[in-house]
Image (cartoon, helix red, strand yellow):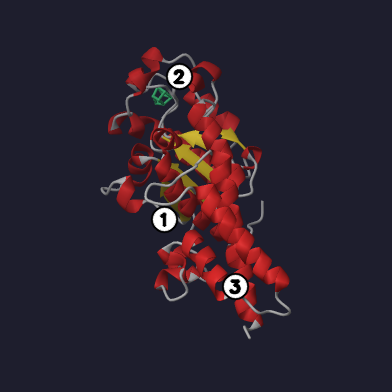
Amino acid sequence: MQSENETAEFLSILKETREQLVYFKELGVERIEGESPVSRSMETAVRQAETSVAESPGPQITGGAATTARAESAPESYTSDSPASSPATLFGDLAAPPVRIQKSSESFEEIWADIGDCTRCPLYQERTNIVHTDGNHKARLMFVGEAPGADEDAQARPFVGRAGQLLTKIIEAIGMKREEVLIGNVNRCRPPGNRPPTPEEASMCKPFLLREIAVVQPDVIVVLGNTAMKNLLDIKQGITRVRGQFQDYHGVKVMPTFHPAYLLRDPSKKKETWEDLKKVRDYLDTAPKRET
Ligand code: SF4
């Protein structure tokens, strides 16, 4: 007979597997490189496991189904014997939060008035619009990219093109709505030919983003892609090494992950992005909600 704890753990694995399946379906992932087709294998595992629970007289679990579900859903860092599975390891010491950046009482409108018809860096020359940070000014979760693209430049809103639509799906996959979060870029003007902004261009524009962060004080910032990560965090290592590991920005948790535009080019990386975003979701579920 399995204990109630084991049953609860098993049901939690089932829930996680089901969520991952929904995420992959949402994002249109049919197959992860080196694995069987996502939807079919995972759906089969979930169905088998659910059936075994439903048919069980008590908290008994069919070990084979449980093993299958865990094997296909849980990354190594989530296995129970891994040190990375403890919340303290994943999120830092939650009992002793670091000193946060000073709360600012200025408004976004005041910050944008300071930006004005900005010519502080060369990117002003080819822009149509300055693309300001968009969304909930009391958000617990913020996304930061590198700079606007053509669609964003035309509409004066961040992440509205194909990559933006994918970002919206990713946000929904962790159970949130786009209107609940805040979305911005390190640079607010479109670089010519969509080239990455230079560190000098980023250093001219970043102070405005930092002022917005001080106003909102989100619990987590997700930095999207290598350029945004390096420009925000001043990290030497690349995104492939750092992604999935919480960083600190003056007391705010920062999760680096792949840029949605990169996921459009290489859909197999959606799996890693899902793992990163699950850590964000779990942290937000665990961290005490701050007063707004
Ligand atoms: S990218 Fe930022 S600093 Fe550069 S011109 Fe645009 S608003 Fe000004």
Question: In which quadrant will I find the N terminus?
Answer: bottom right
Q: Which secondary structure lies at badge 2?
A: helix
- State left or right for residue 34 relative to residue 23: left
Image location (x, y in percent) of residue 204: 36, 30
Rounded to the nearest angstrom, the CA distance separating label 1 from label 2 is 31 Å
Cβ atoms under marks 1 and 2 closer than 8 Å = no
For the point 41% across and 52% down, the residue is 35
For the point 54% across and 50% down, the residue is 40
Of 115 and 15, the residue lying toward us = 15
In the picture, the disc for residue 150 is: 2
In the image, residue 91 above or below residue 240: below
In the picture, the disc for residue 9 is: 3
- State left or right for residue 128 relative to residue 58: left
Which quarter is ligand 1 in?
A: top left
Q: Which secondary structure lies at badge 3?
A: helix
In the image, residue 77 above or below residue 196: below
